[in-house]
Amino acid sequence: MKIDLMPHKAGFVSIIGKPNVGKSTLMNQLVGARISIITSKAQTTRHRIMGILSGDDFQIVYSDTPGMIKPAYKLQSNMMKFVNSSIEDADIVLLVSDLYDEYDEENVKKLSKISQPLILIINKIDLDKGGQTDSKIEYWKSILAKDPIAIIPVSALLGTGIDHVFNSILQNLPEHPPYFPKETLTDKPERFFVSEIIREKIFTNYKKEVPYSTEVVVTEFYEEEKIIRIRAEIFVERRSQKGIIIGKGGLALKKVGIEARKDLETFFGKQVHLETFVKIADDWRKKSQSLKGFGYSS
Ligand code: GDP
Ligand code: MG
């Protein structure tokens, strides 16, 4: 008989911060160092990238948004949009900062509205030429209205301080049963992630009805030393939808492919070759049912 001494902990952790401070690198470290899976919220309006880290008595659901992967042209407003939309259901917020970023008054005011426990990460300490990390910590102490529950200097790139972040999260995670099944999601996470990224691009590039009739199946995923070769099939229900997806001269599909590839390259940290094919299959829903059996879907 198994006696549970530790209550199970589970929760959502939102990773926020300005572009380029190292959010994605940090999330990969937090998730990738252990047995992990990558998935995305199944809801359609906002496809947030999640990295789930499960243990016997805990499950941490990290979220980062693929939209933030792109260098933002309106940095501050973009960050704030992200802050506003991403932390709603978070149990803990990881605010990632590096040695260089600065926040204006308006940004600070928005940050002060975050009601969840906040962990402040000072990233890129490997680039510290002397005292920069300390003065950054002082800077944050002077501008934040509410004290973060922890201030942790890290190098997401080198993996320094990651355990400290993990422990701090675990300590502050609420008691809760797991949100996602622990076993079924561990198989082939990359494929599921790829199909979700492509699906997201379909949702952002076409009008409402078409994306809902679309399913993406990743039929090949070959990782070589310098490049990942991916083949994906986009299933639609009708011929007219196929035409819409492909677009005039193939331009619409090309745009989807380019946007998806960029996000995938940032995520995997590797060059990606992505081939997409559009197919008509009125029974794709059945296929997508069967996919669940392989653990490609949640
Ligand atoms: P994001 O836009 O916040 O998601 O930032 P990314 O994770 O994409 O990282 C932006 C850039 O900063 C990339 O070139 C990373 O390699 C680099 N970077 C991230 N973390 C570190 C770090 O700890 N040290 C150094 N030197 N570079 C880092
Ligand atoms: Mg990113």
Image (cartoon, grey):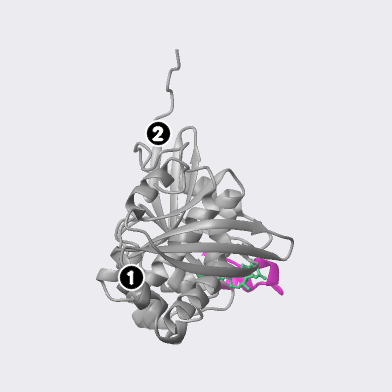
Amino acid type, mark 1 = Arg
Binning the other alpha carbons within 10 Å of mark 1 as few (below 14), some (14 to 19) or many (20 upward) gives few
Q: Is residue 138 part of the magenta span, yes or no?
A: no
Please report the residue visible at 51 percent of the width from the left and 48 percent of the height from the top.
37
Is the C-beta of the residue carrying label 1 under 8 Å from the nearest atom of ligand 2?
no
Ligand number 1: quarter of image: bottom right
Q: Are marks 2 and 1 in contact (CB under 8 Å)?
A: no
| Horizontal side, residue 298 vs residue 122: left or right | left
Residue 152 is tagged as none
Residue shown at 31% from the left, 67% from the top: 238
**Do we see residue 3 in this rendering?**
yes
- Write the residue at 50% across / 66% down: 96
Magenta highlight on residue 127:
yes
Which amino acid type corresponds to the residue marked 2 in the rendered image? His
Magenta span of residues:
121-136
The quadrant of the image that shows the N terminus is: top left
In the rendered image, the residue lying farthest to the right is: 225
Residue underneath mark 1? 239
- Give the quadrant of residue 46: bottom left
Q: Residue 107, image x and y in percent? A: 37, 78
Q: Quadrant of residue 262?
A: bottom right
Residue under label 2: 8
Picture mark count: 2
Q: Secondary structure at mark 1?
A: helix
